[in-house]
Image (tube, rainbow, N blue to C red):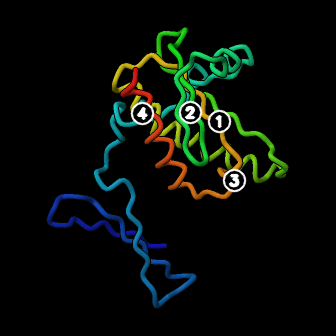
Amino acid sequence: MEVDRLWPEDGLEAVLVWLSRSAPNRTSYMSLNLTGRMPEKESVAPLRFTSADRITKTAEIRRLVRPGTIRARTTALEILAAPSLSDSPRIGVVVSKFGRNSVQRNLVKRRLKEIARVGLMPRLKKDNKRLDVLIRARRQAYGRRFSALDGEAKSALEKICSSK
């Protein structure tokens, strides 16, 4: 494998890799960290979803399900929120079986956790909202694509944040 460095006019470094052994007549381009620098800590930190950011205990989930919490319903999701007992916002995810198998249920859970990590948590932290938010998947969530779930979750959180 041979490696050459190219210096484009815009000053970004690109790496050109020739895969001479496997495909002698083909050239493959691979860009590695075009700026040559590590990402800034500010861009990475808001996307972390630590244990302090999650609601995991049954008592905390029951507190959010009680009457008196703020609720927003969409076709596939129900978002519940209440003032947080901690210093920062927290998010929990609940996905019931609805007669589905564990593979399908875990897929919905992974999607909702990613939506919480990338879309909802940064929004709550940016606005300094000290809320505990519970995302409950409804039966229709099993048939939804990631983008549809993402849109529903963000619109429901917007309703909750505007009513608070």
Q: Look at the numbered disc 1 and give the secondary structure of its residue.
A: strand
User: For the residue marked with disc 1, what is the amino acid?
Assistant: Arg
Q: Which residue is mark 1?
A: 136
N-term-proximal mark, 4 vs 2: 2
Q: Nearer the viewer, residue 64 or 123?
A: 64
Q: Residues within 10 Å of mark 1 (few under 14, many from 20)?
A: many
x and y, in percent, of residue 106 in the image? 73, 46
N-term-proximal mark, 2 vs 3: 2
Report, in whole angstroms, how far the alpha carbon at label 1 lies from the one at label 3: 12 Å
Q: Look at the numbered disc 3 and give the secondary structure of its residue.
A: helix
Q: Residues within 10 Å of mark 4 (few under 14, many from 20)?
A: some
Q: Residues within 10 Å of mark 2 (few under 14, many from 20)?
A: many
Q: Which mark is residue 113?
A: none
- The residue under the point 46% across, 91% down is 25
N-term-proximal mark, 3 vs 4: 3
Q: Nearer the viewer, residue 72 or 49?
A: 72
Q: Look at the numbered disc 2 and give the secondary structure of its residue.
A: strand
N-term-proximal mark, 4 vs 1: 1
x and y, in percent, of residue 20 in the image? 50, 82
Q: Which residue is mark 4?
A: 159
User: For the residue marked with disc 2, what is the amino acid?
Assistant: Ile
- The residue under the point 65% across, 33% down is 93
Q: Nearer the viewer, residue 85 or 12?
A: 85
Q: Which residue is mark 3?
A: 142
Q: Residue 125: which quarter of the image? A: top left
Report, in whole angstroms, how far the alpha carbon at label 4 lies from the one at label 2: 10 Å
Left or right of 50? Residue 155 is left
User: For the residue marked with disc 4, what is the amino acid?
Assistant: Lys
